[in-house]
Image (cartoon, rainbow, N blue to C red):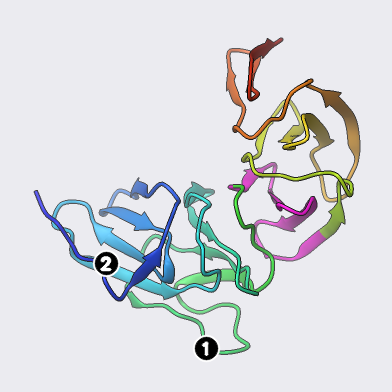
Amino acid sequence: MWRVSRKGDCERSWGTPLVHNDGTRTQVVANGWPFIVSYDLNTGKELWRLRGGGDNPIPTPFIADGLIVVTNAHGGKAPLFAIRPSANGDISLPENSTSNDAIVWSAPNGGTYISTPVVYGGYIYLANHNGLLRCFDFKTGRKMFEERLGLDATCSASLVAADGKIYCPAEEGVVYVLKAGPTLEVLSKNQMGEPCLATPAISQGVLYFRTTQSLLAIG
């Protein structure tokens, strides 16, 4: 139907694009560096662009509470953005600015490198490859906490949430279960017996975890 060159807009991108219909238009948001770009689904026309920061974008953009969430990291920068779907044109932020008409709030060094964050109960949770876990108030962008799960916690899988809990798998084969809320409270550390790099799935009250060797269903 259409094909759009991203030469000059994006040198690297690993994240899956987001397709979002807000009732007015349908857009395709592609994480990238140096620019995050949104395209009209029907025509491929560029709707908006945002100069990112992380030079190796991996997390997938997603929608939460009516806002588009994009993050990336690496190369010394790790921005996190909460963007209005009605954005148009170049919405890049000037130096030392964290919001504008299109960006509700941003955290210049609040993002993640590999793992896609999760929004749950009014907060956004982000797990980093170095075991650092961050939480922000999703409405205001206020940081609630920034703490390490452990020196041996390497988080590549994306976070999932259910039943008042945040589930955070680590490459070392441990699934951290966190109590949802503005403070870090680790409810349990579950040894899976094998490295865990894949994002868990949740369906009908069952948690599914894929390790390097096994698939586990946990009620």
Which sits in the foreground, 78 or 93? Answer: 78
The answer to which image quadrant residue 204 occupies is: top right
> Relative to 63, is 104 above or below?
below
Q: Quadrant of residue 99?
A: bottom right
Q: Is residue 140 magenta?
A: yes
Q: Nearer the viewer, mark 1 or mark 2?
A: 2
Task: Give the quadrant of residue 85.
Answer: bottom left
Horizontal and vertical percent position of residue 174: 80, 30
User: Does the magenta run of residues contain 210?
Assistant: no
Q: Residue at x 89, y 28 (%)?
A: 188
**Which stretch did the figure color magenta?**
116-144
Type of the residue with mark 2: Arg
Q: For mark 1, what is the residue?
A: 94
- Could you tell me which secondary element the residue under label 2 belongs to? loop
Residue 189, labelled with which disc?
Answer: none
At x 74% / y 66%, what residue is drawn? Answer: 142
- Return the x and y of residue 135 as percentages of the image width and height: 76, 54
Residue 88 higher or lower than 32, as above or below: below
Q: Is residue 39 visible?
A: yes
The image shows residue 10 at horizontal and vertical percentages of: 36, 68
Outermost residue toward the left in this view: 1
> What residue is at 32 percent from the left and 70 percent from the top?
48
Q: Is residue 87 visible?
A: no
- The residue indicated by pointer 2 is 6
In the rendered view, tell whether residue 196 sits above or below residue 30: above
Residue type at numbered disc 1: Pro
